[in-house]
């Protein structure tokens, strides 16, 4: 997003984390007791408690599939799983409940993404030996929060994104670690 000149050695992207947001919506919507290390979504999701059994391993498989996919896209749970059935229930052809909810959050995350313009980044990229791509995805969870998914992929909350000093510190740490890779 910040470096459109592909001749540079590092590309830094900042985008909505729609795949992760969709997974968290399914978790919160059905009151699933998985992924509890990740805060709840900021806007209250009206839970309809499911009595379906969803294991932490099943959740982890889905989360890993999202991490392994390109940024900013929906990734359905593995087919034939309980999570797939719950996902299909909120993503059915008639209602698209999940899609509507995720898209309704887009305006706020887009606003905070557009507002964050670190002045130091371009010169840092030019001087850094780091190569490849680094992606930060923004999700609407409560409080200032972040999770390093891989050395090149970061998940941050909208609230953290609003704090430019905290984002600068986090990006300096995360991007600086790429110099050793």
Image (spheres, grey):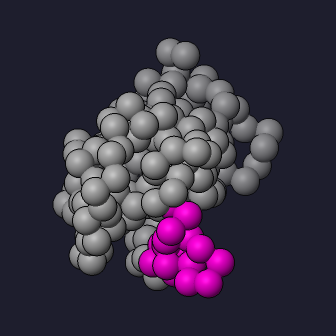
Q: Is residue 140 magenta?
A: no
Residue 161 falls in image quadrant: bottom left
User: Looking at the image, how many numbered discs can be counted on the residues?
Assistant: 0
Q: Residue at x 39, y 64 (%)?
A: 25
Q: Where residue 60 sits: x, y (%)? A: 41, 35
Task: Kindly give the residue lying farthest to the front in the view shown.
Answer: 51
Residue 126: horizontal and vertical position, in percent? 62, 37
Quadrant of the image occupied by residue 7: top right
Q: Is residue 1 left or right of residue 152?
A: right
Residue lying furthest top in this view?
Answer: 180
Residue situated furthest right in the rendering? 7
Q: Residue at x 50, y 68 (%)?
A: 89
* Foreground residue among 23 and 91: 91
Which quarter of the image is occupied by the C terminus? Answer: top right
Residue 137 vs 64, above or below: the answer is: below
Q: Please provide the residue range marked out in magenta.
A: 87-102
Question: Is 149 displayed left or right of 179 in the figure?
Answer: left
Front-most of residues 10 and 19: 19
Answer yes or no: is residue 51 visible: yes
Which is more toward the observer, 40 or 116? 40
The answer to whether any part of residue 159 appears in the image is no
Q: Is residue 154 above or below residue 119?
A: above
**Drawn side of residue 163 relative to residue 67, left or right:** left
In this view, the residue in front, 17 or 89, is 89
**Whether residue 97 is situated above or below residue 25 in the rendered picture:** below
Q: Is residue 97 magenta?
A: yes
Say which residue appears at 33% left-offset and 67% top-offset. 29
Image coords of residue 142 (percent x, y): 22, 63
Magenta stretch: helix, strand or loop mostly: helix
């Amino acid at each position: 997003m910040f470096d459109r000149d592909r001749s540079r050695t590092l590309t830094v992207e900042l985008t909505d984390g729609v795949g992760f947001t969709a997974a968290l919506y399914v978790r919160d919507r059905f009151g699933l007791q998985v992924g509890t290390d990740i805060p709840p979504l900021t806007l209250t999701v009206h839970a309809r408690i499911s009595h379906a059994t969803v294991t932490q391993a099943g959740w982890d498989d889905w989360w890993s599939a999202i991490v392994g996919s390109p940024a900013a896209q929906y990734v359905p749970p593995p087919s034939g799983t309980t999570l797939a059935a719950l996902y299909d229930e909120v993503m059915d052809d008639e209602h698209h409940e999940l899609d509507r909810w995720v898209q309704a959050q887009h305006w706020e995350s887009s606003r905070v993404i557009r507002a964050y313009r670190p002045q130091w980044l371009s010169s840092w990229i030019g001087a850094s030996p780091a190569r490849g791509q680094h992606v930060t995805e923004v999700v609407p969870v409560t409080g200032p929060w972040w999770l390093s998914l891989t050395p090149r992929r970061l998940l941050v909350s909208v609230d953290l994104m609003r704090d430019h000093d905290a984002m600068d510190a986090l990006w300096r740490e995360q991007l600086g670690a790429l110099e050793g890779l």
